[in-house]
Amino acid sequence: MSSITESTNESSRGEPRQSHRSENWLDRRLPPANSVTLSLRTVFILPTREGMIFALMLFVMVIAAINYQNSLIFSITFLLGSLFVVSILHTYRNLSGLTLSAGSTRAAFAGEDAEFSVIVSRQGDRTFEAIHLGWKDSMLRIVDLVDDEESKVRLYVGTSKRGILTPGRMLVQTFYPVGLFRAWSHVDLDMSTIVYPRPLFAGSVPPALGSSKEGDLLRREGVDDFIGLRDYQDGDGLRHIAWKSYARTHELFTKQFAAYMDRRVWLEWDYFRGMDRENRLSRLCYWVVQLAKSSDAYGLRLPGLEIAPASGTEHREEVLKALALFELE
Amino acid sequence: MTEFQIPRNSLAWMLAAQVAVIAPHVPRLAPWIIVVCLGCGLWRIMVFLGRWSYPGRWTKVLFVLVGIIGVPIGYGRHFFQLEPAVALLIVAFVLKLLEMHHKRDAFIVIFLAYFVLTTEFLYSQTIPTSIYMGLVMAMITAALIGLNQTQGHLKPVHTFKLAGVLLGQSVPLMVVLFILFPRVGPLWTVPLQSQSARTGISDNMSPGDIASLTQSDELAFRVTFAGEVPPNSQLYWRGLVFSRYDGTSWSQARTGYGPTPVEWANNLNADWDSLIERRGKPVSYSVILEPTNQNWLFALPTPVPLTEGIGLVRDFRLYSLKPVQSRLRYEVVSFLDHRTERELSDYWRSRMTSLPQKGNPLSWRLATQLRGQSSSSEQFISRILLMFNVEEFTYTLKPPLLGEDEVDDFIMVTKRGFCEHFASSFVFMMRAAKIPARVVVGYQGGEFNPIGNYLAVHQFDAHAWAEVWIEGEGWRRVDPTSVVAPERIEDGLQAAVDDEQSFLEDSPLSWFKYSQTLWLTELRLQLSAIGHYWDAWIVGYNPTMQVRFLGQFMGEVNIKKIGITLFVTFGSVLLCIALLLLKKRKATPLDSVSREYLAFCGLMEKLGFGRQIGEGPIHYAERIGSHRPEMYKAVREVTDIYVDLNYSGRQDPQSDELKRAVRAFRLRLMAANV
């Protein structure tokens, strides 16, 4: 069984704030890598608040056992105390040996959530249950690895500004099986993704510059504008036959239409004079998003950078990436 | 925030555990609390099914108020005892079921369940209770595990098994803690179980009391003797001494016995201790007494208490400082051969001969008359005993009711009675003849369990007899029952009342009814022996026992030694469990084909052709062949068989073709070397 559930973020509580020093120490102990298998050295474990309450309850039970001189209450208390200790091993075991690998990532616009896929896998017949995964301050996902050898978990990280997002160390934790202890590790899978500028409304897309200029490319056999007649050929549609000419000349002609295949739009840095860089980029980004919905070709001109007009998904990504990385601080 | 939804797995176990954990408490709970429990459980199920919602705030306040006010009202003056505390705990537990908005609330419910489970041991500490509680514990733990599993986990049996595994792994550590955790005495006094009526000897005796007590087959106490068990006729377990008679019932003398009424163990220095003349070889034994809620203990005369908190009182019986609320183990040395109170002061003489002036005129007259005919008090005693023996006196569990003048009625009219009738009328006659006498109640005899090597004394062994003071000798035990029904003393009650079939008449299913069936008796003795060891070693493991037990291994026991031993043992056991849990799984054992091929590779390696990492068998063979063309054919042959067996899957893997080929290769190699 591999089920993934969402949990509210319980992770931040009780999590020690990482100082710069401990970050360095962690880097040495658990250096960033695309695939990490957790081990004794890299898993930390501490009682949860419930574990503390449990320990307190055990204390009260021991007092009761002493005061009542009751051996069986002693036994129960000792059994629960041993369960407490043994659960450390089980909780630790539920994390140690787990392999986490970087999966695909998906870019996002600033303000949206970027998607990071993490592949959780196991070797051998040891199973893992209720593993919480996620980055700090974001929704944690819970995953089981019981029947499956591996499971792909999509994680989302909030973004605020354009550029390259490296979410850094991911939290992996588990409370399983008894919730009295929390085992956790911070794993850096060396993942990153691009965050495009936040699109800001910039009015309608600027007019295509080239449709009236010479040298514009026409594609034949469009439907938009009538451009002339040619000799009838077998197979031409009856609707397109120029009947008036036939009436005049008794020769068959076919009407020819053409579409403007390319309305080359240039997205210019200079459109937004007086604005600061981020605002310009956001508005350009908005246009890119709008233009990408049409088939129009668009190019980008930024100071020191020009991308020739084109269309398609790859072009869109190229342009957006240029916007994302432009003069990055 | 969305409402916390408790995993179904966990909820199912939680509700099951709720029922299981409260069930043993039911007989002690007020009916309305049971209604509250059922109601809350039902409500929780309805919440789960989505039919009802959680109770609103005011409903909850109402529930809590009902609990807080209801429990004290229901228990009234017993409020500061154990039952109301347990009842409050149970009410809190079931009400909390209806308030599980967060995961933490569910944890609290589970912790409360563990707590309620513990309280049951304040009432019962038997093996069946412990086994049952072990199961309930696994149920509660399953609920705890379910809480930490994903919502989609729907295998409750799997969860329960895991709980069992966790608890099973905890048991060795528990045993270490149980033995080595330093035991100390109570830190402060705690509310105890309210004085519920217990079967047992009470502090006054009216005709019929002991007869009704003998209807019970409950255990009274068990005795383990250090040496041989004395004969049955010597097993008079003295409990209480009655010296006041009001015409109907016998009771204890009301006033104390002077400045030091009790001599505490290891401090026998009261002024009256000199009244006891201890002779002969002492009998040493330990008693495990079932709870009586009373202070008096049972021992053979004349006892010397050896256990802390137990003393000897002026009428030479044992007394506990605190009422026996839970099973009590005490050590005693008894001098069966003894003289007590050779000199009797006038005060005591008058006390021990006092009788109500009214009533029983016929007995008075008979006693005076017989005393006149007797030359000594001993002769008088014999005459009275002879009267019981010769005349038509019958020992019966079903004596007829007696009129106002009880002794007259018994001696002259009914002549049918149980031990208390004989003891009571005997002492009456003695006192009427101005011979100091008193009634003693306790138990007589017992059943020896050869498996557990102890003597079990049951309620049906309850008995009453007399003590008569004789000039120059002191107190002498006289048991009138022994002349009427000697088999009672020799073989016990069952033999004595065999004719009338009245033994344990009200409990047809009692084990003891079937003593004729040998295997049943055997089984009963065996179970009883197991129970005895349980009570003695597990339930009875207290600070004294711990010191004695550990002393066998570590000499003088002190807290430092115990601490170090505990630390080391606990650590080693934990390490073993950790290794077991965390060890890497061994690679699956090689099949025979791979083993043979690896042997072949080993041969080649000796010749300087180690197989490289990631090198396939055929490439390996080719590489060898390129260096040693003369071997190529043979190497290729082995390799081909291996490849065929291992990868094609066509041939039977059990075939020993490869084995033969490798052996042939090896022989050829050896031949070449020679």
Image: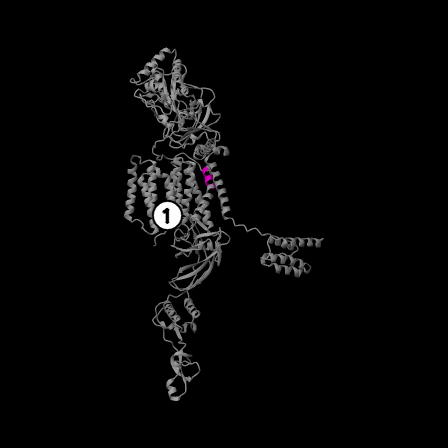
Pinpoint residue B80: horizontal percent, then vertical percent: 32, 36
Quick one: which residue is furthest to the right in this view? B674
Q: Position of residue A102 (x, y in %)?
A: 47, 59
| Number of marks present in the image shown | 1
Left or right? Give the position of A93 relative to A280.
right
- Comparing B490 with A282, the one in front is B490
Q: Is residue A117 left or right of residue B434?
A: right
| Range of residues picked out in magenta | B172-178
Looking at the picture, does residue B574 appear above or below residue B509?
below
Q: Which of B154/A238 is in front?
A: A238
Query: In the picture shown, does residue A74 fall above or below B10?
Result: above
Q: Is residue B404 visible?
A: yes
Q: Quadrant of residue B70?
A: top left
Residue topped by disc 1: B106
Q: Is residue B281 left or right of residue B117?
A: right
Residue B474: where, in percent of width, then height? Answer: 40, 17
Q: Quadrant of the N terminus of chain B?
A: bottom left
The colour scheme used to paint the residues is one colour
Residue A318: horizontal and vertical position, in percent?
43, 69
Amino acid type shown at disc 1: Ala
A74 up-or-down from B143: above or below:
above
Q: Regarding mark 1 in the picture, which secondary structure is present there?
A: helix
Most common secondary structure along the magenta stretch: helix
Residue lying at 33% horizontally and 50% vertically, measured from the top left: B47
Q: Nearer the viewer, residue A35 or B61?
A: B61
Q: Is residue A25 one of those drawn in magenta?
A: no
One can see residue B352 in this view: no
Q: Residues within 10 Å of mark 1 (few under 14, many from 20)?
A: many
Above or below, A194 relative to B63: below
Q: Chain of mark 1?
A: B
